[in-house]
Amino acid sequence: MLDFFTRFFKPERSGSLAKERLRLVLLSDHLSLAPDVVESLKRDLIEVISRYCEVDVANTDVSFEQQDSAVAMLANIPILGLRTGRPTPPSSAPPSTPPYEPPSGATPAHAAVAHDEPKIAADLATHAVAEIAAAAPVVAALEATVASPIESAKPKASRKRRRRRPNLTQQAPAT
Amino acid sequence: MMQETTPLEGSAPIAASVPKPRGRAIVVTSGKGGVGKTTTTANLGTALARTGARVVLIDADVGLRNLDIVLGLENRVRNHLLDVLEEKATLEEALVVDKRVPSLQLLAAAQTREKDDVDTAQMKALVDRLRDRFDYVIIDCPAGIEAGFQNAVVGADEAIIVCTPEVSAVRDADRVVGLLGNEMKVQLIINRLRPALVKKGKMLSVEDVNAILRLPLLGVIADEPDVIISTNRGEPLANDDTSRAGASYRAIAGRIAGTDTSKPEIPQEPSFFEKLFGGRR
């Protein structure tokens, strides 16, 4: 009975569900990134930034979205504070670990990526650090645009737009 | 019958001085199977030929021949695509003239062979050769993106993507568009739209699909029972002047030929009053 009423007042619109599923699946198609790769990218990103700052891991958010004809990666990483002294050298990781390989055998994604350092993560980290140095503690906002393969023919500069400005008022944890 | 002039290997350019107008080679593809490529090919071929254009349809789905069935020509096929490519038969022996529209001809696929048996370079040469003799060479592409797809696409310089308003079909269409490359002129037909479901928000709309694919829209075909009936009978709807889907196919043919510059009509669910007071569906 209740079911009837909910249906009556809120008709099922699976069309929009289809649209959203399609959007997400095409995003990973265009990036050639499987969902577990995105997850490990996020982990690596946090790991690199953690060498320099204390990161609020629980509230970290990495997402991808379509912006016009490009795909943008948005990383929202709250910084709790800067680490004092020299950053932990990356040598804590085994030297020259192989890049992340998609589902190859029994290795769980977590284990496989724990020490990897994909170049993209490293590059982004530099941006993050630049911003953090200017105004810590803040939310580091990273953004990278990736031209989707289909659109790559069109002249579209790898423009970097900064959508989320570091918000000083919102995130001001006690230091 | 026309004279056989160039051998199959002879894809050499025609004597350059007088450029003969060559036919257009259009591949009908989708990635996903079962979205209506073959039905679309048969109907567009019929609709174009009805305007007097010389049209040849190539069934490139080697091993799963179907275009002859949809056209109702299955009893007339004697030789097929691979016979021609392997020079076991001449083009004249293999081409089947349509029952209803004489300027429409079919080159059927081999049923007992495999897609890997087709030589890509030979396929391209064949399409090139047909373009000298027909105004339109329309190639019915098999589903998938493997060898069969490559062979179907190799000779074409235009592509028509057939897509249904489903997540899986749109995803596959998107992938195929990426594979076609930038040289190819690519246009879209949305097939099997159910306006009543779109109206209720239960189906992807034309706008939803093309927000993803972003292709020039040739037309939209509603999901109508008479499409199934026509394939049962082997009589393409483009020949049926009372059919709504047939009219859509003829309009698309007009847009392909460039004689119709109007925007494609999107099938709408009739309103309550229209239903009540009848009129045309």
Image (cartoon, coloured by chain):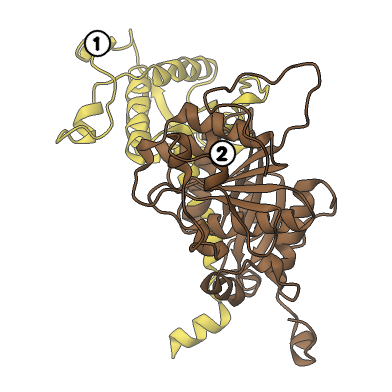
Q: Is residue B134 visible?
A: yes
Kind of element beneath mark 1: loop
Q: Is residue A36 above or below residue B51?
A: above
What residue is shown at x 69% (from left), y 43% (from top)?
B136
Subunit under mark 1:
A
Rounded to the nearest angstrom, the CA distance separating label 2 from label 1 is 37 Å
Kind of element beneath mark 2: helix
**Which residue is denoted by mark 1 in the rendering?**
A96
Please state which of residues B161 and B68 is positioned toward the viewer in this rendering: B68
Q: Is residue B107 above or below residue A74?
A: below
Give the chain ID for the yellow colour: A
Q: How far across and down, in percent of the image, does residue A114 sit?
A: 24, 26
State left or right for residue B217 relative to residue B225. right
Q: Residues within 10 Å of mark 1 (few under 14, many from 20)?
A: few
Give the chain ID for the brown colour: B
Q: How far across and down, in percent of the image, does residue A141 sit?
A: 52, 28
**Which residue is denoted by mark 2 in the rendering?**
B177
Q: How far across and down, in percent of the image, does residue A113 sit?
A: 25, 27
Q: Residues within 10 Å of mark 2 (few under 14, many from 20)?
A: many
Q: In this rendering, which labeled residue sits more in front, label 2 or label 1?
A: 2
Q: From the image, which quarter does the N terminus of chain B lie in? A: top right
Task: Report the amino acid beneath label 1.
Answer: Ser
Subunit under mark 2:
B
- Asked whether the residues under the numbered discs 2 and 1 touch, taking CB atoms below 8 Å apart as contact, a structural biologist would say no
Task: Report the amino acid beneath label 2.
Answer: Val
**Identity of the residue furthest to the left in this view:** A106
What residue is shown at x 28% (from left), y 12% (from top)?
A88
